[in-house]
Image (spheres, helix red, strand yellow):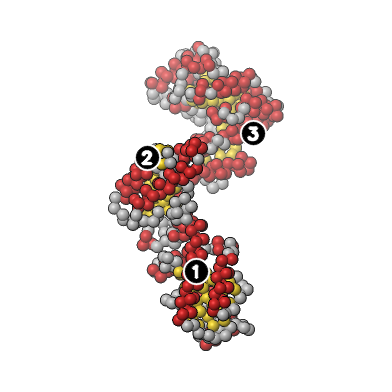
Amino acid sequence: MSDPIHAEQERLAAVHALQWLETAKSEDFDRICRLAAAYFKVPTVLVSLVEKDRQWFAGRVGFDAPETPIDQSFCAHTIRQDDVMVVPNACQDPRFVANALVTREGGIRFYAGAQLKTRQGLVLGSLCIINRLPDQLEETERRALKDFAEMVMAQIEQRQMLNHRDPITGLPNLRQFLVDHAYRNPAEDGRLLVMIDALDRHWGQGMTLTHGIRPLHAVIKRLAERLSRRLEDTTPLYHISERQFCFMLPAQIPHREAMVHSVVLMLCESELLEGVTTQPAARAGVAQFDSPDESITDLLRKAMYAVETATQGRTYWATYDAVKDSAYRRAFTFINDLPRALTNGEIYLEFQPRFSLGDGRQVSAEALLRWKHPVLGQISPAEFIPVIERDAQISRVTRWVLDNAMQTMTRWSNLDCKLSINLSPLDFQGLGIADAIQQACVEHHVDAQRLEFEITEGEWIRSNPNVLEQLAKIRGLGADVAIDDFGTGYSNFAYLHEIPANVIKLDQSIVTNLEHSKRNRVIARSIFQLAHDLGYRTVAEGIETFKCMELVREFGCHEAQGYFFSRPISAERFAALCDANRFPLQALSCVVPVSEPPHGRGLLNAPQPAPLFV
């Protein structure tokens, strides 16, 4: 891109930033036009802003149209002159002799225009005077026309100050930043955007509630002064939101990391203002132009994400991480698309069977949430459920699961099996989960004794008295309560007696490695034995081999589930397999007497089948 083209892009961006003048009509510009018309004794005066394909008029006298095509614009020529452009007789000027504004009846003959130029040297358009008769312009009149143009620019700058400057600090604001960087010069690729969150949000809110808004504004103004002094003669500083500032750095600036670090440390220094000791706790984010197609708004978003990374990581500053950002945006997609997915079939349930290790019967099934996104494809529950929990949407999903699981149980009324449903710790905070379960059972005519509800172990159970109360209500309905993932984290039999649970599910991280880990075998055997002595029904999940199944049976486990038996399957396939008695342990129980002692001729010595379902 050549310099003239880049200069024109900057000029167009500056004009585009004034489009609010087109809708917010101001009498001040028309007043200047009337004064100029009286001074020069002409019928028409225009304040013309020249864009790529048109010119439009911020003020006008003696001209009906609010804009004209660029090919009719005299002012498009004025902006390329070094001085006032004068056309004594347009009918004799080859540039305009065929112009529609000239050839029409009573068309333009005399034209004179003075540039509307910003302090940065960008020409936005012109103030022009027009007559239907040929004329000349004296030198004193040329100077007067320039003065009128300066009056117009003063009005524009005054309005820009209101729209493009922060009222507290007087610094250029976000709107001005977008104007200044709307077009990129490839020679500047690699530049860095540094965004600074200069004030801790919670501290700022607390100070405002305690002392009022004035001390907060004093702190923000003081921080802006510090930043301005630090960056003086280096780069322009922008105040883009109440707490945030930003500035650009060239790609090759030496020691830029040290500079950013020192800026943040400087902002974190406390001082006494308005009788309040400041605690800024500033954070900064750094992002770099990576692609020629990247816009300034893209760069702003990346810098904002880098600031959030620094805040979450409790560091002074952080650089943009594309991998983490991609994951963050993917998570946002989950939240944004969740309502639709719950209604259009993208989110659905599958069911993993559970079997009795005593007689091989299929006794239960666990309802598992699945999401097939139209763009992202199949999404793992391990990925989307934590995101939904962080966004406090999990109770909405739990209600959906309850309704759909109960509908399934209604269709399975002829099957002798329970259904296990997972609950989130967040379900016990806002959702009256026990009442919701009871209501769902009533609506779908499902006996609560056919249900089991799984919760993960953890301190959260005892830290909130409402949890134990809700669990007791669930048990009171007749449903089972299972402690899932037992054996990791907060595992503690000492507190189990406080929890109204009657089932323990051993964590699959212990189960899946039983064959190769003596330590895991010791842990599993101990847990099963103690749970049995305390009266709990035990379940091993994550069974993937015949030998692993035989080990947990030998250890006294009551029930098991895992890929060895079946992957999660649809409700229809589950019902069909139940009706046909085609689950694997049912076949094995016909080969091996269930009364055989665990250390005798057990299932381990029976023919070892391959997994039946995949």
Can residue 518 be seen here? yes
Up-down relation of residue 144 to residue 328 (above or below)? below
Q: Residue 404 bears which disc, if any? A: 3
Marks 2,1: beta carbons within 8 A: no
Q: Check disc 2 and give the amino acid type.
A: Ser
In whole angstroms, how far apart are the C-alphas of marks 1 and 3? 71 Å
Up-down relation of residue 33 to residue 476 (above or below)? below
Between 110 and 415, the one nearer to me in the picture: 110
x and y, in percent, of residue 131 in the image: 57, 81
Image quadrant containing the N terminus:
bottom left
Nearer the N terminus, badge 2 or badge 1? 1
The secondary element bearing badge 2 is classed as: loop
Residue where numbered disc 1 is placed: 151
Can residue 365 be seen here? no
The secondary element bearing badge 1 is classed as: helix
Between 20 and 136, the one nearer to me in the picture: 136
97 vs 232, left or right, is: right
Residue where numbered disc 2 is placed: 270
In whole angstroms, how far apart are the C-alphas of marks 2 and 1? 45 Å
562 vs 198, left or right, is: right
Up-down relation of residue 479 to residue 99 (above or below)? above
x and y, in percent, of residue 236 in the image: 39, 56
User: Which mark is in front, 3 or 2?
Assistant: 2
Q: Residue furthest left?
A: 254
Rate crowding at label 2 as few (under 14), some (14 to 19) or many (20 or more) other CA atoms within 10 Å.
few
Residue under the point 61% across and 72% down: 65
Residue under the point 56% across and 76% down: 37
The secondary element bearing badge 3 is classed as: helix
Q: Check disc 3 and give the amino acid type.
A: Asn
